């Protein structure tokens, strides 16, 4: 009895294993994810390279079954017949599109199903026709495309040679006439205002050096703020009255805007008179005893009658309390024999020197 006990145990284990396998298969086919299946016939109108029995079937990218049978069509050896088994719940329709896709780096082929709206009649076997060229891989498609391109080039070799010859003739003509073309383009740039802008030439206003000995020095601190002026004078261009076309001044620029330039040169003039008591540019560094306020009325070339340079400044001296201590209108003009930048700047220097000397003497007496 003891001798047969192990055999009974082993036999019982084997039977249990067999029952477990059959139970697993039953569960897998009914409730474990595979469930009931439906078979469909698929016809490929061309080769299906690499497709094997057991290959996956995808519906809208989701795996729903596999290929169960492959064979050549008996009536047309170019066609391939296949049978696919998919889950019965898959919404396969009579117009469902069938294709062949190559997945992964190794290009494993799978059958693809997409969409469809027409429901097949009940009881009729459903045969799905794959798209033409569905079995073409990317490599094959590239070969076919290159073959077609080669055919087109071969059929049109004559016209292509003529076109290349014409292009060479045209390029040779351009090379021979490069100078003329550059001239034409330069002319177009001038007409349209394009091209590299002309280099501007900057001119400065000179402060008088020989202001005279400082007979009387400043007994109080003085500041000269930036002069005021109308918008027309807020420029670096040379101004003319009346306004006209003066091509010789097209590239002319003062070193700064006219109000800033007048302020700087007035301070330079006062420094040349008495460097020890030179005025401040502004009163920001401390409250000065007096401020010399300048309003620019004219700073131009007048061309009516005798051509001349005109400078006119309105000056006021104001104390700490804002009271006007003194006021004066200072004007100067200088004859201009030749209307060109260098002569005009020299005339402005002469006129400004007289105004600066007059303002210095008047200011020294007032403060």
Image (cartoon, grey):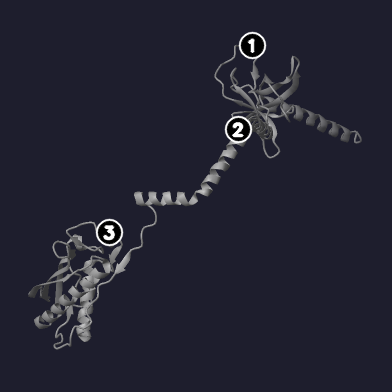
Residue 253, how many percent across, how many down? Answer: 28, 65
Marks 3/1: CA–CA distance? 95 Å
Q: Looking at the image, is 121 positioned above or below residue 60?
A: above
Query: Label 2: few (<14), some or many (≥20) within 10 Å?
Result: few
Please give the label number shown on residue 149: none
Q: Nearer the viewer, mark 3 or mark 1?
A: 3
User: Where is mark 3, residue-wise?
Assistant: 247
Q: Left or right? Give the position of 261 relative to 71.
A: left
The residue shown at (59%, 29%) is: 60
Q: Looking at the image, is 339 positioned above or below residue 7?
A: below
Residue 21, how many percent across, how many down? Answer: 76, 29
The residue shown at (23%, 82%) is: 209
Q: Nearer the viewer, residue 141 or 8?
A: 141
User: Where is mark 2, residue-wise?
Assistant: 159
Q: Earlier in the sequence, mark 2 or mark 1?
A: 1
Marks 2/3: CA–CA distance? 56 Å
């Amino acid at each position: 009895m003891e001798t047969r006990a192990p055999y009974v145990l082993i036999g019982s284990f084997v039977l249990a294993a067999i029952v477990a396998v059959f139970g697993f298969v039953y569960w897998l086919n009914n409730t474990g994810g595979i469930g009931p299946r439906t078979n469909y016939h698929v016809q490929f109108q061309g080769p299906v390279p690499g497709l094997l029995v057991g290959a996956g079937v995808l519906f809208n990218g989701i795996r729903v079954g596999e290929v169960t049978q492959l064979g050549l069509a008996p009536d047309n050896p170019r066609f391939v017949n296949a049978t696919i088994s998919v889950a019965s719940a898959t919404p396969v329709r009579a117009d469902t599109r069938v294709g062949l896709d190559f997945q992964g780096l190794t290009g494993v082929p799978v059958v693809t199903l997409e969409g469809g709206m027409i429901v097949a009649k009940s009881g009729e076997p459903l045969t799905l026709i794959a798209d033409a060229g569905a079995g073409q891989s990317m490599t094959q498609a590239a070969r076919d495309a290159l073959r077609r391109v080669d055919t087109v080039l071969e059929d049109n070799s004559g016209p292509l040679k003529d076109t290349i010859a014409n292009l060479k003739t045209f390029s040779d003509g351009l090379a021979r006439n490069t100078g003329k073309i550059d001239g034409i383009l330069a002319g177009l740039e001038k007409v349209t205002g394009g091209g590299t802008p002309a280099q501007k030439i900057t001119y400065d206003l000179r402060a008088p050096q020989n202001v005279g000995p400082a007979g009387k020095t400043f007994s109080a601190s003085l500041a000269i703020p930036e002069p005021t002026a109308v918008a027309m004078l807020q420029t670096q261009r040379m101004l003319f009255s009346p306004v006209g076309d003066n091509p010789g001044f097209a590239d002319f620029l003062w070193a700064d805007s006219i109000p800033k330039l007048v302020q700087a040169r007035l301070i330079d003039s006062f420094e040349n008179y008495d460097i020890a008591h030179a005025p401040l540019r502004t009163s920001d560094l401390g409250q000065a005893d007096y401020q010399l306020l300048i309003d620019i009325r004219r700073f131009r070339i007048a061309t009516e009658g005798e051509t001349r340079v005109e400078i006119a400044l309105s000056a006021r001296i104001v104390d700490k309390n804002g009271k006007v201590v003194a006021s004066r209108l200072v004007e100067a003009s200088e004859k201009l024999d030749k209307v060109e930048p260098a002569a005009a700047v020299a005339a402005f220097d002469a006129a400004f020197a007289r105004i600066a000397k007059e303002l210095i003497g008047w200011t020294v007496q007032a403060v």
